[in-house]
Amino acid sequence: MKTINLRDLYPDVYKTDTFVEVTEEVLDVIQATQWLEAAYPLVL
């Protein structure tokens, strides 16, 4: 299990650090989504 900070993902919702443990699979999906969102303007 990996620990992530929800404040990094949702800064408008979480004003303080909130750490949660997630499985490797969930972390992979989060990272893939971040990569796709970052690459989206390049796809147009």
Image (spheres, grey):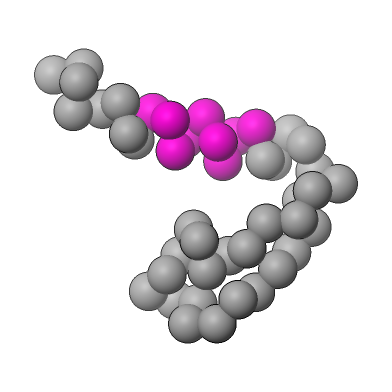
Which quadrant of the view contains residue 27?
Answer: top right
Which residue does the image show at 69% across and 41% down from the upper left? 26
Q: Is residue 29 magenta?
A: yes
Task: Return the residue found at the far top.
Answer: 43
Task: Return the residue found at the far bottom.
Answer: 15
Relative to 20, say whether 17 is above or below: below
State which quarter of the image contains the C terminus: top left
x then y, percent, for residue 16: 55, 82
Q: Magenta segment, which residues?
A: 28-36
Which quadrant of the view contains residue 21?
Answer: bottom right
Which residue does the image show at 32% across and 34% down from the upper left? 38
x then y, percent, for residue 35: 43, 30
Relative to 14, say whether 30 is above or below: above
Task: Return the residue found at the far right.
Answer: 1
Figure label count: 0
Which residue does the image show at 42% across and 70% down from the upper left? 11
x then y, percent, for residue 22: 76, 51
Q: Looking at the magenta stretch, what is its main secondary structure?
A: helix
Q: Does the magenta stretch include residue 6?
A: no
Which residue does the image show at 21% across and 17% down from the upper left? 43
Judged left or right of residue 9, residue 40 is left
Relative to 23, say whether 12 is above or below: below
x then y, percent, for residue 14: 50, 77
Task: Return the residue found at the far left.
Answer: 44
Relative to 43, say whether 28 is above or below: below
